[in-house]
Every structure is written in structure tokens, then in C-alpha cells.
Amino acid sequence: MSDAVKVGGRVNKEDQAPKLWTGDFYNEGVNAHDGLFDKLGEECGVFGVFGHSEAASLSYYGLHALQHRGQESAGICVADGESFKYHRGMGLVKEVFNNDNLGTMIGANAIGHVRYSTSGESKLANAQPLVFKYREGDLAIATNGNLTNAPDIKRELEKQGSIFQTTSDTEVVAHLIARSKHDDIVLAVKEALLKIEGAYAFMFLTKDKLIAARDPYGLRPFVMGRLGTAWLFASESCAFDAVGGTYYRDVEPGELLVLDMKTGMKEDRFSPIKQRAICAMEYIYFARPDSDIDEVNIHSARKRMGRQLAMEAFVDADVVTGVPDSSISAAIGFAEQTGIPYELGLIKNRYTGRTFIQPSQELREQGVKMKLSAVRSIVAGKRVVMIDDSIVRGTTSLRIVNMLREAGATEVHVRISSPPFANPCFYGIDTPDRKELIAANKSIEEIRQAINADSLHFLSKDGLLSAIGRQSNEPSRGYCTACFDNRYPTPLPEDAKVGCGCD
């Protein structure tokens, strides 16, 4: 299908629209960007099982609970003490797996992955877990995060003769392990992890071991759970609930956990904690409301963000509504603090998944209507407070504000439960280049005008950290807030500091 719009048998070059996808589906392709909507991209999710006879099935349900973290591809690798069985595919977990392929994956240990590409192309070769032949046997790797120095390491390895099969920076770690002077896989993994920088939650699977590691800053969430005598690992604790497991504790920054079929679990380290800096956007937007991260419940934290926002930026109105789904908790908190009724003024269409139909030019311009609808009977004739978690480019905010006005809202006041998002992320969140971030280029008043709101306020950084609630004397209370304040906790390549590190 042509990128240009045909008018009367000819191509009107002035109406050329960007192609929304490169695969068979409109939201499948490089980064699976959904060109209609202006939200941050998910980060990927990992799930692991050690010591359960139904490891493959548990991984399936665990990944299903983490589906919000990545919809491009899914994969599971199972080890039975002697060999691997694995399956990967493009699409959602329920599309990739079935009784036939899961039935062949026999073993007590498994790692699984759902992917949203922030580094590397969206294609099957990059689907995880990545599986390699290692001199000590088979090795599978699954990770959530982004390695900021992966391009530099890859160039060096290629000069030394390494040949890469994927464009995923996870393969860089596999090559470092393969080149290690250590035959022992644990020592080789430690050596490799000490050479990389960035944000990550890694799981390594051999025929008889599972190794879990979290970056020394704790940028990416990574939790441990129990199910009977089995150990579970996941990006979020909601995955444990899905399989009947219970939360045990968070994997510590710099920690290396080695689970061996003969000797059990050993708690170890590859690095001291450098500076706790867990991603604040997990609490604001990414994690599911029923997850706990660092022993803080996400729904409760978001309600407190809404309450704090109400104290910082009260406005007299008739109705409070939240943009589904991640802003609902904050909207409830705002309503409770102000006494303004909370209503479902916006409804999400949950069946806008992958489609073969390319949206028309008209739907590109009003594309948010494919995903959201305003409830006219709730907002007509009302002064509406619209709560959202963030503004990235501003395009979707404008569409939602206009949608509420078209439904009869007399005023639309926008309140954002995070500070202005003004800086790109280099740690595994898919963000635009700085020049595309509206908060990096416009004042709050200019943003208000751009989104056609009657008023606009963002939650302050201090208000955000107070609302999340964890006490800490570390910088930013132990959270990464670089997207708000440009203070990146890890070293960055020089060329990354002026652009986006997510390519």
C-alpha cells in the first residue's frame, strides 16, 4: 500500500501521511509504534520459574499478566536438566502459544519474555529468550532494559571477529559470556555484567541453572516470588498472582542469584549498589495497578499522586475523569481530595488490537476515537477535570480535550500526575527525540494553548516523590527522574546526551 493518498487516480504529494507499520498489521513493525496515539512505549517483561514441573504453563500465565509491557513478540525456554525446549513468535502471548507447543516444553525450569523493542528491530530473530550454543552447553537469555554502552561493545567485538545474528543488545552480553576466560557460567556472567552499563533485569538459563541479575542502580523492576517450593521471578508482582504464587522480595540492585538443581539457591553479588534509581515512570504509568514495586502498591501510589495534584492545582469543576487505564487511580485520588465527583467520562475500546486495515487519513487525524470515546451524558454541560499521567508530544492530549468539548463539556481542565516529561530515556523506555517532546520546547502556558485546555498543571517533582512514599536519603529518594530533571544516574555515551538512546 502506498504511503501517499490517492486523489482522483493521482497521488497528492501534499497529503502524504507517514506509514504506520512495516509488517502485516498496523501496529506491528519496527518498535510496533502505534502512529495514532501519543504514549510512551512499554519496556518488555520477563518471567522465570525454577523447580516446578509445570514451568512452561506457569510462564505462559505469568507472561499473560505482563502483556502490557510488550506486545510485539513472546517466548519461553524450558530446561529439564539435560536439554532445552523453546518456542518464540511474533504477536501476543495467546497468539504465540497453544496446547500443542506448550505440551512439548517439559521441564522444571523456564524463562519467558514479552517484547517491546526499544533497541533493535521488531522481527522474530530479536524475539526473546535468545538461545545460544555455549562451550559449556546451551544458554538462553531474557532481559528487560537497555544497555547504554552496547553499541560501543558491539563494535569492539566485531573488530575481534564476533558475528552478530540479531540487532538486540542482549546478544552483546552473550558474546561477552562466550569470550570469557572462565568456563564456569556464573563467573562468566559476572565478568560480562561488569562490562555493561545501563538498566536491566537479566535471566540466564542453562540446562541445570537459572541466574537472575539486576543492574547496580535498580533502574528496572525485578521481583522474586514463591509457589510451594518453586522460585518465581518477574518484572512485576502481578505475575505471581496470576499463577497462584506469592511475593517474596525484590531482587536487589547489583545482586546475582544462582539457582542450581543440585545445590539450590545462592545469594551473591556482581556489583555493590551504586545508587538506587528505580524508574519513576513505573509508578506513574507502566506497572499494573495491582503490582507492588519496592513494596509500594502502584494503585495506592497513583491515588496519592492524584491527591497531591489536587492540593497543588485545585480547580472548581463539576466532574473528574481519568484517561484509561493508567490515570484512573490518580483521578480517583483527585476526586476524593477535592470532593468533586469522579465519573467515567472517557471509555476505552479494548478491541482495537492488530488489524489489517490501514486507518484512513480522517482517522489518522482523529485516531484517538478508535481507542477512546467520551460519554456525552456525563460531560455535556459540565466543567471537566481531565487527569492524565503524562504528556509526550501533546497530540493525543489535544485530541482528547477536543473530544470532550465535542461531547458538550463547557470547560476542560487538564491535570497531569507527573512533572513535565522533557528528556528522553536511555534505559529501556521508548521515547521520542528531545526535539519531539513538547515539554522540552514549550512553556506550560504554551502547552496549554497547544492542547486547547482551559487550564493545565503538572504534579511537582517533590509532590511526585512524596506521593510514591518510599523514604530514602538517596538522590530523588532513590528514583530515576531523568525524564523530568535531566539527571541521569548512569554514565551515558557522549552522542546519547543530545538525542534519544532508544534507536
Image: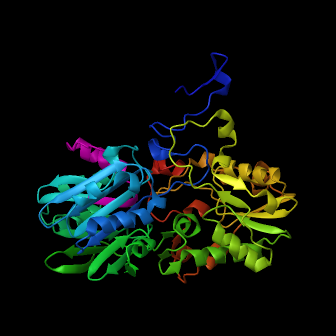
> Of all residues shown, which one is farthest toward the front?
99
Image coordinates for residue 393, horizontal then vertical, percent: 65, 49
Left or right, 108 with respect to 32, comes to left
For the residue pair 463 and 344, the one nearer the viewer reads as 344
Q: Give x and y (percent) for residue 213.
A: 32, 69
Q: Is residue 362 magenta?
A: no
Residue at the image position 55 percent from the left and 34 percent from the top:
19
Query: Which range is magenta?
Result: 141-166
Left or right relative to 501: residue 462? right
The structure residue drawn at horizontal position 27% and vertical position 78%, both measured from the top left corner, is 230
> Is any atom of residue 79 visible in this view?
yes
* x, y percent for residue 286: 53, 64
Residue at (42% x, 75% y) in the render: 241
Question: Above or below — where is 99 with respect to 360?
Answer: below
Q: Is residue 159 highlighted in magenta?
A: yes
Residue 254 visible? The answer is: no
Q: Residue 422 at x, y = what percent?
A: 63, 56
Seen in the picture, residue 157 relative to 77 is either above or below; the reply is above
Quadrant in which residue 189 is drawn = bottom left
**How many numbered marks appear?**
0
Kindly identify the residue that appears in the image at 33 percent across and 55 percent down: 97
Using the image, determine if residue 66 lies above or below residue 118: below
